[in-house]
Image: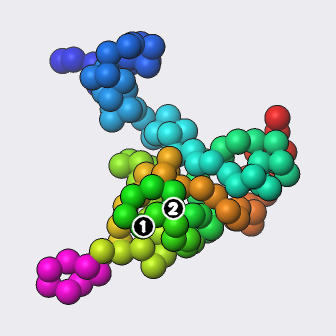
């Protein structure tokens, strides 16, 4: 049986191995791929350029068909590395609305959800 995951793929220059690293990564590594940029004022306040996205954060969409729209993060799917935002949905042919998944790298965090004490500790770390 072939190995499902190896950290050696990360250092490879071959795109197929880089993709393999991301797709087959365990959840604790996939969670690190869900980082999103902060706005200029948040960047100055916390001294960080990016932070892992979480449910409850307010974000602005920077790329794609919904560019420029803002909303609150409703759900974060770590397995597929996708984020679902309130009021961002596409209409199917039968008329039903379905939440549209967006990758975290295409978002900018405008307001952080600071209800969790652990998250505030993470933001204070340098």
Kindly identify which residue carries mark 1.
66
In this view of the protein, can residue 79 be seen by the observer?
A: yes
Q: Residue at x 70, y 42 (%)?
A: 49
Mark 1: which secondary structure? Answer: loop
When the figure is inspected, residue 32 is found, relative to residue 10, above or below; the finding is: below
Q: Is residue 97 left or right of residue 61?
A: left
Rendered location of residue 77, percent (x, y): 42, 56
Front residue of 111 and 69: 69
> Which span is picked out in magenta?
91-97
Task: Using the image, determine if residue 35 lies above or below residue 71.
Answer: above
Mark 2 and mark 1 lie on one chain; the one further toward the N terminus is 2
Name above or below for residue 124 compared with residue 107: above
Q: Is residue 74 magenta?
A: no
Please, what is the dominant secondary structure of the magenta stretch? Answer: loop
Residue 96: within the magenta? yes
SS class, disc 2: strand
Q: Residue shown at 55%/72% (left/top)?
A: 71
Identity of the residue furthest to the left in this view: 94
Q: Mark 2 = which residue?
A: 61
Q: Is residue 72 left or right of residue 126?
A: left
Q: Is residue 76 visible?
A: no
Instruction: Determine crowd level at label 2: few under 14, some 14-19, many 20+ residues with C-alpha closer than 10 A.
Output: many
Q: Position of residue 7 (x, y in %)?
A: 44, 18
């Amino acid at each position: 049986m072939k190995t499902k995951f190896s950290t050696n793929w990360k250092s490879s220059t071959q795109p197929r191995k880089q993709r393999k690293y991301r797709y087959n990564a365990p959840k604790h590594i996939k969670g690190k791929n869900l980082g999103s940029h902060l706005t200029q004022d948040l960047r100055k306040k916390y001294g960080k350029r990016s932070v892992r996205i979480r449910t409850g954060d307010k974000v602005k969409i920077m790329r794609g068909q919904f560019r420029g729209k803002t909303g609150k993060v409703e759900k974060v799917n770590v397995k597929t590395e996708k984020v679902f935002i309130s009021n961002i949905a596409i209409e199917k042919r039968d008329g039903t609305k379905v939440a549209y998944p967006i990758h975290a790298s295409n978002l900018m965090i405008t307001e952080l959800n600071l209800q969790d004490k652990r998250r505030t500790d993470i933001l204070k770390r340098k």
